[in-house]
Image: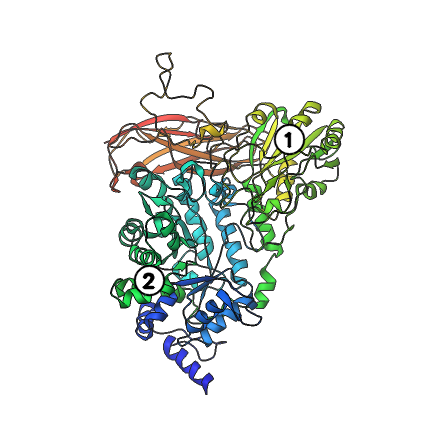
Amino acid sequence: MKSLLRILAFATLTLAQAQPKKPLKSTLSVEQRIDDLLKRMTLEEKVGQMNQYNGFWEVTGPAPSGGDAQRKYEHLKKGWVGSMLNVRGVDQVRAVQKIAVEETRLGIPLIIGFDLIHGYKTISPIPLAEAASWDMEAIKASAQMAADEASASGITWTFAPNVDISRDARWGRVMEGAGEDPFLGSKIATARVHGFQGETRDDLSKNNTIAACAKHFAGYGFVEAGREYNTVDIGTATLYNTVLPPFEAAKKAGVRTFMNAFNLLNGIPATGNSFLQRDILKEKWQFEGFVITDWASIREMITHGYAKDGAAASKLAVEAGADMDMESHLYVAELVRLVQEGKVEQKWVDDAVRRILRVKFELGLFDDPYRYCDPKREKATISSATQRAKALDMAKKSVVLLKNDRNLLPLKKEGQRIALIGPLAADKTSPLGSWRLAADEGSAVSVWEGMQKYTGNRLTYAEGAPLTLGKTTFVDELVFNTSDTSGFEKAIQVAKDADVVVMVLGEHGLQSGEARSRTSLDLPGVQQQLLEAIYAVNANIVLVLQNGRPLALPWAAEHIPAIIEAWHLGTESGNAIAQVLYGDYNPSGKLPMSFPRNVGQCPIYYNHFSTGRPTNSENNVFWSHYSDRENTPQWPFGFGLSYTTFAYGTPVLSKATYVQGEPVEVQVSITNTGNYAGSEVVQLYMHDHYARIARPVKELKGFQKVTLAPGETQTVKFLLTDAELGFYDTTGTYVVEPGTFSLFIGTDSEKGQEVRFELQ
């Protein structure tokens, strides 16, 4: 009898199926179904939908019988939990979903969240590395791969993409984003949202797509001194022109959720910032999805000194537009009483719940709450050959060739004696990077393994020195080896007997990411000593860098003849690097962040302002410069070499004067002048010479990736519209003004031929 009543109630509530194996679509609209459900919900059940708990017990085992876990379990059974995170695997997800759907009064399904920052089981390159590909289709395919695997394991929501723009490599979370440029960042935000969710709103109901989350809203990439969780203090011109564009692009791409940030903005925590969440996101941009807080960020408003206590923090957060509470436990503890006492208006709760239910309906969870719980699909999808092939493709496209003097690269495939040296050369875990929560430890292909597949050379390996000491986990500080050089002698002997030395150095995979800020950007531990010791006996060094942020390596830039930026490339890391080293893949990556000469230059970025004294025009000290170092980066934004060479023709405008609203057309020819087929990212930058607010010296406004055979020439055309020609003023109004404009087309942000036009 109880089972029959449950089926009837669920069918009445959702107008869905009584037979789960053959779901029937409702004839009512999503909004009508939400209206019907809201009428049935108690205030406690509504607030419950705004409550997200981290996974708190082995859900296929016995129920918890004490402590915080028991309290959370009881809330779940009462329908006071709207979402859970870090529950994964079909068996686990089905178990918690069954409680929500079959044991609560209304049977509202859970949305299951997980951090898919760069993959699920099969790990892709870190997002900053993917950004170096400048290949939107590849980036989209990488997100699709993550969605395929995660959805096959029951996950319906990811806390990605991170679309924070950042100019400061000291901040560890630069590895999660697209780098320093809002134009490139906006394109990547769109690609990743479409990869996770599909191209249209209807695609979200497919069982291999998941809801995406644009984060961190907003300004988190500008934390002072690059220190995690620190405050942010920026002007409105920077907010509107640099910080917000990728978020708006994600919204336009259909992203269903936003995550607010830990930081203050203009003295107000982002979680309690109604200007960001209500005025801009929900009103100006007309965002219809919901906002999730970052981990315990409602409670942290008390620590910020913005809220007196948990009740005050809850009131500030819900009124500012934070719809779901991640692990603060405050909404579920405070909101019902606040509404009943008239301290919080019921409309804010109803609005938040409507938004949350809307996404659940769009995911198809009400029509079939177990649609993501197919064990056969899970087994067939996770770590499949298809997934690994996609990861390999993305990894190769992410590699950036920084230097290739003496033509050491590509390596010969036979007849060479090659020494492979470095603490990261045989590492099978570090290349997985920071956010590899579901990946198996040691599941990455190492460089040692990848290079062993090329059997024509004599390959010898020596570690040189360990990089870290003790345990390496996601939640612990790393301890680096700063004194043990006992392995140097073996590495030196191996290097002496080699024609070419390949050294794999850099950061541990857990040295970048959340809470991994640094005050130095050098090679940690004794790696610099090792590099110089090997150089002293054999200067034919190919340096392969594995890192999650730009590094400052002035000695290597001056002395080492060949340098490859290989980032943390994920599961297929070693295979990708080996194919690049041996020339089976010609590198085409371009830097998405400037690499400083010294950490003292940070933050450093290409789209800076000229200042009033940009050059040494009067041959004295009074101009904007450092007294001990150049202003320029070691390697600029957009930089990246190839095994071939490219020659650019002179850019040609369709005419010299345009009127507002008229597209500006410019084209350039590019020729492969080398001996290898290769791909080049042709980059277009613009400078607005004068405006109501000063404009940067250059701004990226277009790019195209072209592939050319040796001797082949191709004409690349760009079209600039008002979307590229204008900017936001300090009030957030988008304007296009008449004036003089320069366009620069070239291979990176520093090298480009200039043409000018007038806009009337």
Foreground pick, 224 / 130: 224
Q: The residue under label 1 is which amino acid type? A: Val
Q: Earlier in the sequence, mark 2 or mark 1?
A: 2
Mark 2 to mark 1 CA distance (whole Å): 55 Å
On screen, residue 653 above or below 39: above
Q: Quadrant of residue 665?
A: top left
Q: In which quadrant will I find the C terminus?
A: top left
Residue 611 is left or right of residue 669, and the answer is left
- Is the image coloured rainbow, by chain, by secondary structure, or in one colour? rainbow
Q: Residues within 10 Å of mark 2 (few under 14, many from 20)?
A: many
* Position of residue 572 measured from the top left corner of the image (x, y, whole percent): 62, 47
What is the number of the mark on residue 94? none
Residue 669 is left or right of residue 434, and the answer is left
* Position of residue 282 measured from the top left corner of the image (x, y, whole percent): 29, 54
Q: Which residue is mark 2?
A: 352
Q: Secondary structure at mark 2?
A: helix
Residue 395 is left or right of residue 73, and the answer is right
Q: Which residue is mark 1?
A: 542
User: Which residue is depicted at the point 70% across and 37% down?
Assistant: 463
Q: Residues within 10 Å of mark 1 (few under 14, many from 20)?
A: many
